[in-house]
Amino acid sequence: MEDNTRVQLWTKDFLLGLSSYFFLYLSISLLFLLPLFLKQFHPKEREVGLIMGIHSLTAIMIRPFFGRLIDRRGGKEISLLGLVILILTMPFFHLIKNAGIFPVSLRALTGVGWGISMTATITMCTDLTPAQSLARSIGIVGVAGLIANAVGPTIGEEIINHFGFSGLFNSCLIFLIISFALVIWTREMPVEDRAAESGSGKSKKTWNSISIILMIIIGSMPVLHGSVRGAILYFMPLLIKSLNLGRVGPFFVIFSLAAILSRFRLGGLSDYYGRKKIVFLSALIISFNLFLISRINGQLLLLSTGFIGGFGQGLIYPALSTYLVDFMGRENKGLAISLYNSLFDAGMGVGSVIYGWISESIGLKLMYLVAGIFLLLANIIFNFKAPEFKPLKS
């Protein structure tokens, strides 16, 4: 059964969709270097923060609205819409002359295009794989994003060195056009097949019967997952420097490689053993790792926490995101994926502020201990209160 599923998973259309997601993510990751371009205008830090942050804010806000549309119209059409917004917006980056409202508006538009196309492309890819391999397919798509996120800034620096920032913006546009073409060439699952996969309405939820408390418990998990990811991304460089443990890069390289490894090789575990078991296990690993970070005193433990943390993060994403799909019903897959990503991104944003306050009060090491306690308590509540769904694979 595993061999047959593996053959069905790696189809030409899935590979086309996967490649389109990679080039979409690669284009967006090049814009991480936008602050370097803005330096020539001598902006204030808050102006740079607003320009960079508005992208995530608009993406968070737009995803749930288009998630429902994806379920009705299919991922391909909506993905193309998001890509068109990005393609039409990108040439205007050449016209930026200051760090004012114009670049803020452009970044807001890229956030809209990204929020739409990202969710739609993930949904399109999962539609092209066996229903019983949902977590595995989401994990693999996530690997494409991780790789693009890792190599994008490095490629961007080389482009800037050889062709300047005009070359960077042109490269973003080229990658978006490649992504658009790949989506065009991808065969979309027919509407009737999507309906059959979701059980032709049999799995539809009666939302009135679900308590608000249960929704909060389930919704808090991606928020906390995002906040912990933000704590690693934003504060680990400060901790490493404060402890005089050398360069920051090796930690994040090991973290990314471990996340890619666990997503690619073990991303489908929840398809076999159930979502809750894998969510609980992965959150437990992440909590344990946060406790270890609070005890870091040398290079070996630092790099060990990079591996353990990346491994846990790689496991939790496919399991928790597909748990939300199971909870909301397969007919609401696009909406569920969009909500998960919005809750995750909101957690990263809000968490960075909250953990910043905590670190100022008690220090960086104890801040990670507090983060681990938060996640552990939420994980225990989730394990006892959230419903389990029978895996489709035996």
Image (cartoon, grey):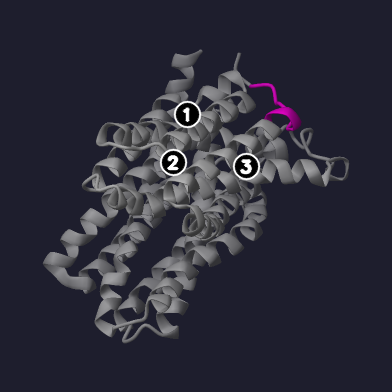
Q: Residue furthest front?
A: 362
| Mark positioned earlier in the residue sequence (3 or 1) | 3
Q: Are marks 3 and 1 in contact (CB under 8 Å)?
A: no
Of 284 and 147, nearer the camera is: 284
Q: Determine the secondary structure under disc 2.
A: helix
Of 7 and 51, nearer the camera is: 51
Looking at the rendered structure, the kind of residue marked 2 is: Gly
Which residue is drawn at the image coordinates 31% and 86% (left, top)?
97
Q: Quadrant of residue 209?
A: top right
| Mark positioned earlier in the residue sequence (3 or 2) | 2
Q: Determine the secondary structure under disc 1.
A: loop
Q: Are marks 1 and 2 in contact (CB under 8 Å)?
A: yes
Q: How many marks?
A: 3
Residue 205, given in percent of the width and then of the height, sits at 80, 39
Q: CA distance from mark 3 to mark 1?
A: 18 Å
Q: Is residue 297 above or below residue 87?
A: above
Residue located beneath label 3 in the image: 221
Residue 272, given in percent of the width and then of the height, sits at 57, 19
Looking at the rendered structure, the kind of residue marked 1 is: Gly
Instruction: Tell me which segment is drawn in magenta.
Output: 383-391
Residue 129 visible in image: no
Residue 164, given in percent of the width and then of the height, sits at 17, 71
Looking at the rendered structure, the kind of residue marked 3 is: Met
Q: Of helix, strand and loop, which mostly describes the magenta segment?
A: loop
Which residue is drawn at the image coordinates 38% and 76% (left, top)?
45
